[in-house]
Amino acid sequence: MYMRYLMKNMNNYLRLIFSAFILLFASSMSAQDADFVYEDRVYDELIRSVQIYINNQPALVPIIGLNSGFRSFTLRFDEMSDDANEYFYRVVHCDRNWKASDLEEIEYIEGFNGEEIQNYQFSTNTYVDYVNFSLTLPNEDIQFRISGNYILIVYDDEVMTNPVIMRRFMIDEEQVQLFTDLQRVNDVTKSNSHQQLDVKVDLGEMRIGDPMNELSLSIVQNNRWDNMINNSPPKFISRNRVNFDNTGKLAMAAGKEFRQFDIRSLQYTTAYVSEIDLHDQGTNVLLHTEKPRAYRVYRDEVDFDGRYIVQNFDFQPSSNNVNSQSNESNFNADYADVSFALKMNQNLDEVYVVGAFTDWKLEEVYKMQYNNKHKGYHVTIPMKQGVYNYLFATKGADGKPYYDELEGDSEETVNFYTTILYYRDFIQQYDRIIDTQQVIAIGKY
């Protein structure tokens, strides 16, 4: 009995020492990376299908209330291997610009950072071997003390020096009430290509000393961070209502409805899928050849606003639970080599496939190659069974995706907007999120 007591306390003692080391290491990293902007990114080519979502709903933006005990985040990703590696994680509190805040870990989390991700499942009945990892936050090791922007970092080493995944998420206090509406664009040169938001805040009973300097607004379109409106200040205040600038600064290029395809079944073709070839080594999927549409008229189509879902229709779920098929798809959905084709007579410098599955970035693996014989661009990408939205993009002068040449914009496009209200007073000195709102802008104002 005494030995058991001694070992238990020794384990707790070692755990505290290790946690203190991680805290010091994290503080050191924060000091070194004061100007580093944290963003959604995958650093390891063996990691695929990374998603962070709420309560088994991949279509939702990862935001939960500070005291909403019934809601949680789930991170899922696949390691393309037949053996499970060890992965560790930590969360970092950020300011409104997604840089590490000046807070110590003990100020924003309760529990231990640097724990191992212990929940994983080997793929079953698939041609391609992989291990599906999952992590839920908050959990018994970590709970959140304050609101704001957070980054979740996954490492493949225990001392956490080699990040493989970064994912953004947000904690909302829900202290005030946001009102977001679509209105006519003020700039007539953008009236056919942009959408403008009108945002007001009802402060209710909340008292803010200097709203003009302590409040700011960010707007995210279709859960994309590459084109967000950031740090927009209030325009004016009337009693307890704050009005944000609606004279053009809250206007965003509307884009067009996303291109899409459905490979939830590899037994038959669906819309936008031309051929499916099953062979001993796996599956090849050939999508219909697409064309540029920058100068084509707007076409209304139902999409997932740029997201994707993982799902396998080629099996019977082991339970009658409505979520069983979706949950089991995480480890029994297969990977297929999906071939994209874009018909073009003009050979542009660089063309990419872009979507949530690329983190909205121009990665080399998604770069298309031009074929002079077939007069078009082609690329083949390994992708997990599911439904995908995507776009074609060239590289802009700033190195980011540029859609004007291949996709274009229409004010009639249906977009999903997330408005985020930040509050930073002179006492607490960190960026709180006091409310968020998610709205669908349907066509014209």
Image (spheres, rainbow, N blue to C red):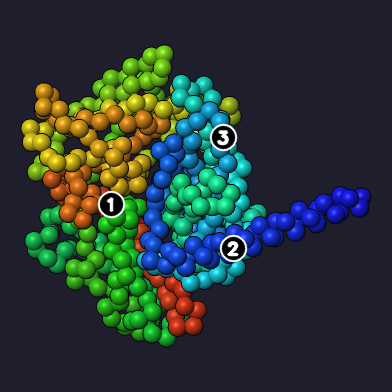
Residue 176 shows up from this direction: no
Q: Residue at x 54, y 62 (%)?
A: 26
Q: Residues within 10 Å of mark 1 (few under 14, many from 20)?
A: many
Measured Cα–Cα span from mark 3 to mark 1 = 39 Å
Q: Residue 17: x and y, percent?
A: 69, 60
Amino acid carrying mark 1 in the image: Asn
Residue 16 in which image quadrant: bottom right
CB of mark 2 within 8 Å of CB of mark 3?
no
Give the quarter of the figure containing the C terminus: bottom left
Residue 210 shows up from this direction: yes
Q: Earlier in the sequence, mark 2 or mark 1?
A: 2
Q: Residues within 10 Å of mark 2 (few under 14, many from 20)?
A: some
Disc 1 secondary structure class: strand
Number of numbered discs on residues? 3
Instruction: Give 181 or 169, whichever is nearer the viewer.
Output: 169
Measured Cα–Cα span from mark 2 to mark 3 = 27 Å
Disc 2 secondary structure class: helix
Q: Read off the residue under disc 1.
A: 415
Q: Residue 74: x and y, percent?
A: 52, 47
Q: Answer with left or right where residue 107 lies relative to residue 199.
A: right
Q: Residue 257: x and y, percent?
A: 23, 44
Q: Read off the residue under disc 2.
A: 23
CB of mark 3 within 8 Å of CB of mark 1?
no
Q: From what the image shows, is residue 356 above or below residue 371? A: below
Q: Answer with left or right where residue 97 lies relative to residue 136.
A: left
Measured Cα–Cα span from mark 2 to mark 1 = 41 Å
Amino acid carrying mark 3 in the image: Ala
Q: Kindly identify which numbered label has been placed on residue 105.
A: none
Q: Residue at x 29, y 40 (%)?
A: 364
Q: Residue 181: x and y, percent?
A: 28, 63
Amino acid carrying mark 2 in the image: Leu
Q: From what the image shows, is residue 362 above or below residue 79? A: below
